[in-house]
Each structure stands twice: as structure tokens, then as C-alpha cells.
Amino acid sequence: MNSQHVLLNLIVFTLPIISLVYIYTGIKLYKYKADEQFNYFSLFMFAAAIYTAGYFLALNALNSEVFLLARSFEYLGVVLIPTFGILFVSAYTKNKLSQRAKFLLFTVSGLLWSMYITNPLYHWTYKRIEMTTAQGFSIASTTKNFGYFFILAYYTLFLAFSVMVLFKTARKSDSLSLKRSCRLLLGSIQFAWIAVLIILL
């Protein structure tokens, strides 16, 4: 077994640990609700846990049926991360969203997930998706369709919204701790832009 394969196995098998860390963090911080009815940061953590666990299960699927089921679970996390991310950032920076805006966000998540899980019938997200293996793991060989780029656009919207709101809050706030927190979040978000760029290329 070469060092590259060992490293790949190490990365893949840390995914369940990362998922558990997300769940633990979400549960631990759930009681800090501030003025909101929900702690959106906890829900953001739970969505990230769903994505990470689904990704791990898909990589280790033994057949195409399990693979597609695991990817459907993974994509539930994928479409919820931007929704809960926007809600968390808006609540954290005291930029309240209307109930209509919140309903719209959940509607978008629901439509995107529906588009994915009905892909075998309508092929809106992928024109083709097949399970192949590489280095002992199951991966998807795909031909993307417009629905995939809708999901990517939703992520881009989440990142752009977060950058603008956090930058504005950091610039205008009189609280040094809030300024530092906003700058830390802004720095973290830049890594997500790299991931979007890699996917596009």
C-alpha cells in the first residue's frame, strides 16, 4: 500500500469524525438562541453533518443503489447548508430576514433537493450519473445539467450575501468582539470560494 493510498484512506475515514464533531457542536451550542426562535448555527452544523456523513457513505457504497441513496442523503445536506448559512449570518449580524424571505430560502432548498432526488426520472441535475471506483472508493462519473449549476449558484448567493453582510457589520459595529468575529468568519468564507472555483473549473 503506497503512501498516497494511505493518505487518501486517512482523509476519507476522518469524515465520520468530522460529522460527529459537527453534531456535537450543534447540540452543544443549541441552547444559545439569542433573540431567534431557532439557533441557525446549530442547524447549519447539522446540515454540514448530513453532507459529510452522506459523502462518506457514498464513497464506501458497495453497489449503485446504495451509492445513489447515500448521495441523495448527502445532497439534502448540500441544499440546506446555504439556507441555514444565510439564516445564521443574518441572525448573527442582526440583519433580520422577513418570514417571506425565510420561506423562500426553504422553498429553494426543497426544490433543489426535489430536483436531485427525481434526477433518475427527469435528469435535471445530471444528464448522466454512474458509479465508478477509484483507489477502492465509489465515486460518481457524471455529465452535469442545469440543476447542478442552480445548486452552485445558490452556494454563490450564500457566500456573496455572507461576505457583504459580515463586511458591513465589521465596518459599522462599535463592538470590538463582534468586529473580530465578523473578520474571522469573513476569512473562513474565502476558503469556500476556492471550492466553488475548483468545481467550476
Image: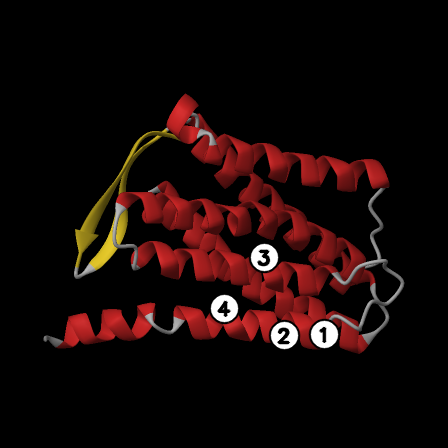
Mark 1 and mark 4: Cα distance apart in space: 15 Å
Q: Earlier in the sequence, mark 1 or mark 4?
A: 4
How far from the left and from the top, in percent, is residue 201? 33, 43
On screen, residue 56 versus residue 5, left or right, reads right
Question: Which label belongs to residue 29?
Answer: 1
The residue positioned 49% from the left and 56% from the top of the image is: 51
In the picture of the structure, the residue carrying the numbered disc 2 is 25
Horizontal placement of 102 versus 183: left or right?
right
Estimate the spatial distance between the alpha carbons at disc 4 and disc 2, rounded to whole Å: 10 Å
Figure check: 21 above or below 112: below
Residue at x 27% of width, y 50% of height? 139
Task: Tell me the CA gap for discs 2 and 3.
Answer: 12 Å
Q: Residue 46's image quarter?
A: bottom right
Q: Quadrant of the N terminus?
A: bottom left
Query: Do labels 2 and 1 touch, CB within 8 Å?
Result: yes
Callout 2: helix, strand or loop? helix
Query: Percent position (x, y) of residue 117?
Result: 47, 35
Q: Quadrant of residue 130?
A: top left
